[in-house]
Amino acid sequence: MKADFSSLFRLFDSIEKQVEGRGSSQPPEEVRVMLEGLMSGTLSSKKERGEAFELLRKEPGWLEWFAEQLKARRKNLPGLQ
């Protein structure tokens, strides 16, 4: 039984660094422009929209920034509140 807990503790120790490393951050300017285009609906091609979603998938720390931006836009647009 002690070996079972040792395995769990090793697992927790190994993933703790991954979890700690994730946080909210603001994307670089070039990426922000693309994500703002996604939010406003100005990304015209399916490829561009796919690239924007892929960036968010690869960088989970940007999701909080993206969500906050969407909330702010929603507050400023009549009918979307």
Image: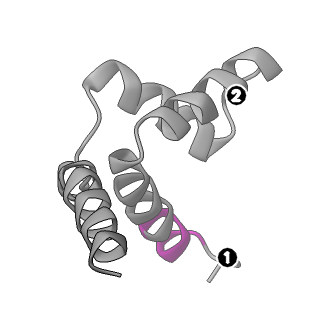
Q: Residues within 10 Å of mark 1 (few under 14, many from 20)?
A: few
Q: Residue at x 62, y 21 (%)?
A: 51
Magenta-highlighted stretch: main secondary structure? helix
Please tell me whether mark 2 sits on a helix, a strand or a loop: helix
Residue identified by numbered label 2: 49
Q: Residues within 10 Å of mark 2 (few under 14, many from 20)?
A: some
Q: Quadrant of the C terminus?
A: bottom right
Which one is earlier in the sequence, the residue at label 2 or at label 1? 2
Residue nearest the observer in this picture, 33 or 18: 18
Quarter occupied by residue 15: bottom left
The range drawn in magenta is: 72-77
Q: Position of residue 14 (x, y in %)?
A: 24, 51
Residue nearest the observer in this picture, 23 or 39: 23
In-image side of 61 versus 35 (left or right)? left
Please tell me whether mark 1 sits on a helix, a strand or a loop: loop
Q: Tell me if residue 22 comes above or below residue 50 in the rendering.
A: below
Whether residue 45 is visible here, answered yes or no, is: no
In-image side of 3 versus 76 (left or right)? left
The residues tagged by marks 2 and 1 sit, at their Cα atoms, a distance apart of: 22 Å
Tell me the amino acid under the disc marked 2. Answer: Arg
Quarter occupied by residue 5: bottom left
Task: Please tell me whether residue 55 belongs to the stretch shown in magenta.
Answer: no
Q: Tell me if residue 71 comes above or below residue 2 in the rendering.
A: above
Q: Residue at x 25, y 55 (%)?
A: 24
Q: Quadrant of the N terminus?
A: bottom left
Is the residue under label 1 in contact with that under label 2 (CB below 8 Å)? no
Q: Which mark, by number, is residue 25?
A: none
Q: Which mark, by number, is residue 80?
A: 1
Q: Position of residue 49 (x, y in %)?
A: 70, 28
Residue nearest the observer in this picture, 19 or 43: 19
Q: Residue at x 21, y 59 (%)?
A: 16
